[in-house]
Amino acid sequence: MYLDGFTYIHPTPTGRNNDQAVDKTLEREINLARNIQTKLLNGPPPQMEGGEIKGSSLPARLIGGDYYDFYPLLNGKIRIVIGDVMGKGIPAAMLMILTRGAFRSAAESTKGPGETLTAMNQAICADLRSLKSFVTLFCADWDPSTGVLTYANAGHVLPLHISGKEGTVQEIPKVKGIMVGGLLGQKYEERTIQVQEEDLVFFYTDGIIEAMNENREQYQTDRLVQTLLENHHEKVEEIEKRVMQSVQDFTEGVSQRDDITMVLLKVNEDKSDISSFNSPVLT
C-alpha cells in the first residue's frame, strides 16, 4: 500500500511478542527471587530443650523487606534478629539480603546483641545512606540455661512479654538505639529481662498492628495483646496461626499494605541447651 508516495508497511506483532517475552522473563525472575527469599526466611528453626521458637513472614507483595533470623551460639545461647527495611517489593528485598549477610557475619564475631547491631551498622551504614534507606532491627540473645534475654534495639517496635503464670502482657523495657543506616559509628546499648517458665516473647514488625480494614481502622496493639492473652497457652505454631487469622478477620479481605513478620519464643519447664541446626560460634 502507498500513501503520498511512501510505502506503508503494515505493523507486525513482533514488538508485542518481544514485550510479552520480556514480561514472562521478568515474572520468572521475580518468582525465583521470591523462592530464594522464602527459603532464606523459612529455614528450619533451632531445636530447643525447654522451649519453642518459630518465625514467619507474609510479604505484602510477591517479595518483601521484612527479615528475621536465628543464629545458635556455642555457649548454648541463640541469637535472634527481626527487622524491617524501609520500602517494599524488590528494592526492599535486595536490602533485606544485604542485612541478612551483615547479621550472619556480625554474629560470628560479636559477643552480644549490642555489638552485633554496632557491627551491622558499621558494615552497611554507608550503603544504606547512599540509597537513602534504613533498617529497623531488634536483636536478642536467649539463654535457656538461665532464662535471661539480653537485647539491643535499632529503632524497631519493642517485643511483647507475656507472663504465662500471671496472664499479663507488656512491652519489654526500652533501650536506646537508632535505626541501622541512620548514623555511622552508632553504638547500641543492651538490657536484660528474666523470662519465666511458660512465658512468651513475641517479636514482630509493625505490619501487624498497622493492618487496615475497609474503614481505614488499624488493627493496633490492643487487638494483638488480646489475641496473645487468649492463646499464649498454645504451642508457638498455633499462636502464630491465630495471630494471622485475627489480622485477616479484622481486615476482611482488604489488600495487605505492609509485610507481616513475627518471631515467637516460648519457654517450657525443662530449660537446657540448644541443638544447633547451623554451625555454632564461640562468644
Image: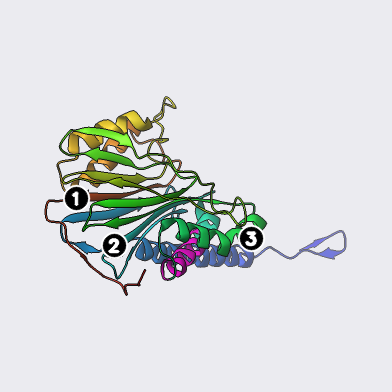
Kindly identify the residue that appears in the image at 26 percent across and 54 percent down: 54
Task: Say which of 254 and 244 sits in front.
Answer: 244
Q: Are marks 2 and 3 in contact (CB under 8 Å)?
A: no
In the rendered structure, which segment of residues is drawn in magenta?
Answer: 96-108
Residue under label 1, please give it: 267
Image-based side of 146 in relation to 254, left or right: left
Quarter holding the N terminus? bottom right
The amino acid type of the residue labelled 3 equals: Ala
Does residue 94 appear in the picture of this structure? no
Instruction: Give the image quarter of residue 250.
Output: top left
Q: Are marks 3 and 1 in contact (CB under 8 Å)?
A: no
Residue under label 2, please give it: 77
Extreme residue toward the bottom, this view: 279
Image-based side of 133 in relation to 164, left or right: right
Instruction: Give the image quarter of residue 225.
Output: top left
Image-based side of 262 in relation to 46, left or right: right
Rounded to the nearest angstrom, the CA distance separating label 2 from label 3 is 31 Å
Give the mark nearer the N terminus: 2 vs 3: 2
Q: Are marks 2 and 1 in contact (CB under 8 Å)?
A: no
Camera-near label (3 vs 1) is 1
Quarter holding the C terminus? bottom left
The amino acid type of the residue labelled 2 equals: Lys
Kindly identify the residue that appears in the image at 26 percent across and 50 percent down: 265
